Image (spheres, helix red, strand yellow):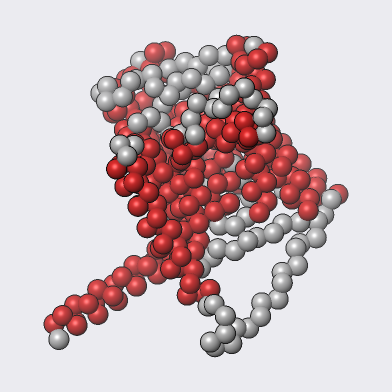
């Protein structure tokens, strides 16, 4: 009886935990904390977290597949750390959507697919110019104390404002009809597959597969690569459960005045920055690691172009991945155009010498010193939060 009582209690608690994790949306602030912790783990694991390099790797392989490049890229996608991390984000969101019984192939109006493609092209071009996307060029760049990260932040904000103004114009002049949902047939008992029950099982199988692949990488002495896949998986799951999206931090203050995502991103950054300072100041990693962005012209203009693109597509580099994982077909087109544009623009900038004119990055502690850099950055992000909260109350910068 005691054994039955124990297992019955364990099963009950497991179900409660499962429902708590997958039947409700996680708060953005919790996601911000968890993402910052994982980003720091990635930094200690090998190098700073990024996303755009993975897109470039995919684009380069498409060029190679169609014979448009000499020789193949140096790393296969399954041997490229950022590519693996990106795949992990997709798989994490896929598993999360399945376990929450939310996975669905979601269609969009025709105009949205065109905007998805154009948005991907703009984001890819902007990422190539800034040498990073909203993650590598802004989020991680700021945490690495890169001057380019702050330049891109201002570019993203300006681009988001322009992109939102266009969307408002489009609503007035090019209204699109919503996609008609197919009527759901009532399932008779014993007939066909009960996807409500099957989805969580598939999701658990996907999660188990990622863990197994991680161990397989370890068996062939590629543990670090397996870690990138696993860390990406965790980020994808967290982002899907919380609907965490960097776009909202730049779009919502102008669209609705909402400041929740600004608070979440700022909190996440402060944790990431504090951890990075310990790692770099303590020489656990090379202090100038992750300092390679195009400051300030490339980061500013690239961020502006990227900001317009993320508004058109409805997703940034990271949210494009996790939304593909939950079945968003529009973002599938964005993913492809982003990868091809990033790879193409990077080649053009290098071949024409434009990259030299976009600037070289600076390491902020070299300019301000470590003791001064930390309080300056802290004050900067506190002011961002306070400005967002003030705007939420007054709607001073809301463009609607």
Q: Quadrant of residue 373?
A: top left
Q: How many marks?
A: 0
Q: Nearer the viewer, residue 300 or 331?
A: 331
Name which residue lies at 37% across and 49% down: 213
**In this picture, is 380 found above or below 92?**
above
Whether residue 218 can be seen here? yes
The residue depicted at 41 percent of the width and 44 percent of the height is 229
Q: Position of residue 198 (x, y in %)?
A: 48, 72
Q: Residue at x 53, y 14 (%)?
A: 360
359 left or right of 42 in image: right
Q: Quadrant of residue 346?
A: top right
In front: 268, or 292? 292
- Assign the N terminus to one quadrant of the image: bottom left
Q: 200 or 239, which lies in front? A: 200
Q: Residue 160 at x, y = what percent?
A: 65, 38
Residue that protrudes farthest toward the bottom in the picture: 189
Q: Nearer the viewer, residue 209 or 350?
A: 209
Residue furthest out toward the right: 173
């Amino acid at each position: 009886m005691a054994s039955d009582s124990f297992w019955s209690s364990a099963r009950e608690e497991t179900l409660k935990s499962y429902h708590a994790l997958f039947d409700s949306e996680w708060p953005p602030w919790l996601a911000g904390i968890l993402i910052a912790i994982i980003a720091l783990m990635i930094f200690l694991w090998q190098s700073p977290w990024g996303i755009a390099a993975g897109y470039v790797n995919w684009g380069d392989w498409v060029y190679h597949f169609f014979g448009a490049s000499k020789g193949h890229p140096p790393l296969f996608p399954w041997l490229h750390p950022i590519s693996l991390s990106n795949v992990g984000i997709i798989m994490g969101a896929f598993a999360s959507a399945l376990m929450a019984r939310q996975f669905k192939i979601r269609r969009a109006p025709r105009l949205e697919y065109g905007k998805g493609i154009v948005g991907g092209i703009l984001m890819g071009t902007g990422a190539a110019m800034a040498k990073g996307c909203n993650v590598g060029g802004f989020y991680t760049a700021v945490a690495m104390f890169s001057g380019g990260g702050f330049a891109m932040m201002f570019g993203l904000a300006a681009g988001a404002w322009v992109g939102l103004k266009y969307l408002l114009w489009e609503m007035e002049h090019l209204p699109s009809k919503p996609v008609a949902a197919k009527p759901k047939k009532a399932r008779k008992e014993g007939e066909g597959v009960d996807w409500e029950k099957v989805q969580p099982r598939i999701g658990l199988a996907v999660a188990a597969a990622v863990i197994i692949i991680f161990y397989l990488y370890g068996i062939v002495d590629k543990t670090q690569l397996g870690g990138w896949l696993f860390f990406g998986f965790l980020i994808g799951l967290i982002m899907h459960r919380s609907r965490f999206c960097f776009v909202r931090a730049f779009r919502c203050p102008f669209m609705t005045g909402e400041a929740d995502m600004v608070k979440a991103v700022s909190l996440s950054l402060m944790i990431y920055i504090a951890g990075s300072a310990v790692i770099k100041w303590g020489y656990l990693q090379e202090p100038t690691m992750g300092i390679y962005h195009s400051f300030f012209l490339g980061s500013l203009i690239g961020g502006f172009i990227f900001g317009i693109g993320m508004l058109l597509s409805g997703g940034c580099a990271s949210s494009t991945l996790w939304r593909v994982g939950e079945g968003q077909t529009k973002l599938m087109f964005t993913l492809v155009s982003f990868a091809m544009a990033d790879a193409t623009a990077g080649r053009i900038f290098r071949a024409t010498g434009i990259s030299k004119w976009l600037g070289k990055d600076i390491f902020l502690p070299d300019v301000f010193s470590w003791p001064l850099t930390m309080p300056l950055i802290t004050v900067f992000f506190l002011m961002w939060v306070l400005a967002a909260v003030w705007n939420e109350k007054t709607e001073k910068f809301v463009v609607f």
